[in-house]
Amino acid sequence: MIPLQTVFCNAGPLIALGKLNRLSLLANLYPYLAIPRTVYREAVSEGRALGSADATAIRLFGARYGCLIVEASQPIVGSYVPLATLDAGERELLALARVEPGALLLLDDELARVEARRLGLSVKGTLGVLVEAFRAGLLTFSDLELLLLAIAARPDIWISKKLCEAVLAELIGDLPAGGKDGPSSRE
């Protein structure tokens, strides 16, 4: 039996996928999803205090799919000194991933992604999750295209329009001739 890969998720992908009502993709793709307590507090507790609907969606998702809320011990967090300025959630996420061999990080913040790569950690962002969902047959190309256009147009999701367009262009270039719905065609 192959052990499940631990996937640590930061607030950015949780919030973006919550706003898009696509959190279930995380459960379908990553059966062992862990959310650091500091990240959960940021995305859910602080989000609910601000009246963010996605905070409730994230809380319900976590409860429904049994996401692990994990907390790094003080020695784990204390032994990690990042070279970049990170928020508390990103720091806890990276500290946990450093001690979990083969872990995948879901992370959108560019400085935190650079730091993760410096540590030799595997990183994927919200757009990478959506592309993986498409390739796994969980989204049609039309679904993916609409989600990328929605992200590019929304000021409350902090992923650039330019990046969304680049991902879309790359995917269109990879599609077989006449196959816009690729591996997940529902027709």
Image (tube, rainbow, N blue to C red):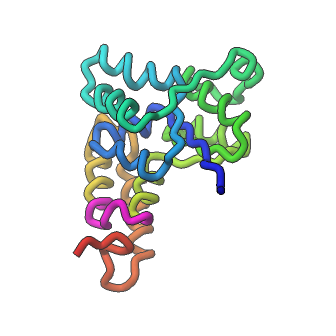
Name the spot of residue 26 as percent of width and height, x first: 43, 46
Name the spot of residue 58 as percent of width and height, x first: 35, 31
Q: Measuring 59% from the left and 47% from the top, which residue is drawn there?
A: 123
Quarter of the rendering containing residue 76: top right
Q: Which residues are magenta?
A: 135-145
29 to the left or right of 144: right
The N terminus appears in which quarter of the rendering? bottom right
107 to the left or right of 45: right
The C terminus appears in which quarter of the rendering? bottom left
41 to the left or right of 83: left
Q: Measuring 50% from the left and 46% from the top, which residue is drawn there?
A: 31
Q: Nearer the viewer, residue 45 or 114?
A: 45
Q: Is residue 180 magenta?
A: no
Q: Is residue 136 magenta?
A: yes
Q: Nearer the viewer, residue 101 or 125?
A: 101
Name the spot of residue 183 as percent of width and height, x first: 38, 73
Quarter of the rendering containing residue 113: top right
Q: Measuring 37% from the left and 59% from the top, which residue is drawn there?
A: 165
Name the spot of residue 72 as percent of width and height, x first: 64, 22
Give above or below for 92 relative to 24: above
Give above or below for 108 relative to 183: above
Q: Residue furthest left?
A: 187
